[in-house]
Image: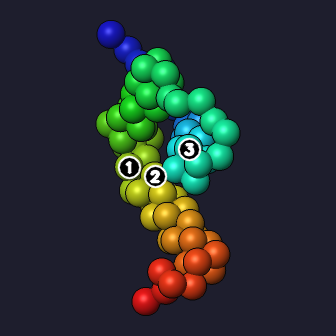
Amino acid sequence: MDRKVIDFDQGWAYMENGIKKLKRILEGLPETQFTSEEYMMLYTTIYNMCTQKPPLDYSQQLYDSFEFNSKFTDKMRKDKDPSTAC
């Protein structure tokens, strides 16, 4: 069975929406929890993007993008709460 190819921009935009939703949930902002369907679609999107045949295997780009996003979020959290600074 052939899977639909997911290009990086399309897949990352979908992932960013999931990351933003998760951040709102973790910050205690009004947000509905992930449904099983939403969770599975995010998981499947990541999995498919990482297992596509080269040059469409985006595992390194996803890692780099998520790492940058995580560092940015950590910096924002430290700026907001100085007691968490190292």
Q: Secondary structure at mark 2?
A: helix
Q: Quadrant of residue 80?
A: bottom right
Which residue is found at the position 38% from the left and 14% from the top?
2
Say if 71 sits above or below 53 in the image. Answer: below
Residue type of the residue flagged with mark 3: Ile
Q: Position of residue 31 (x, y in %)?
A: 63, 36
Label 2 belongs to which residue? 62
Estimate how packed mark 3 is, as few (under 14), some (14 to 19) or many (20 or more) residues with alpha carbons within 10 Å. some
Q: Earlier in the sequence, mark 3 or mark 2?
A: 3
Q: Secondary structure at mark 3?
A: helix
Which residue is found at the position 60% from the left and 41% from the top?
21
Q: Residue furthest bottom?
A: 86
The circle drawn on residue 25 is 3
* Colour option used: rainbow
Residue type of the residue flagged with mark 2: Leu
Task: Give the distance between the C-alpha atoms of the residues marked 1 and 2, in whole angstroms.
Answer: 5 Å
Label 1 belongs to which residue? 59
Say if 47 sits above or below 9 in the image. Answer: above
Q: Secondary structure at mark 1?
A: helix
Say if 17 sits above or below 68 in the image. Answer: above
Quadrant of image for the C terminus: bottom left
- Judged by depth in the image, the label closer to the viewer, 3 or 2, is 3
The answer to whether marks 3 and 1 mark residues whose Cβ atoms lie closer than 8 Å is no
- Judged by depth in the image, the label closer to the viewer, 3 or 1, is 3
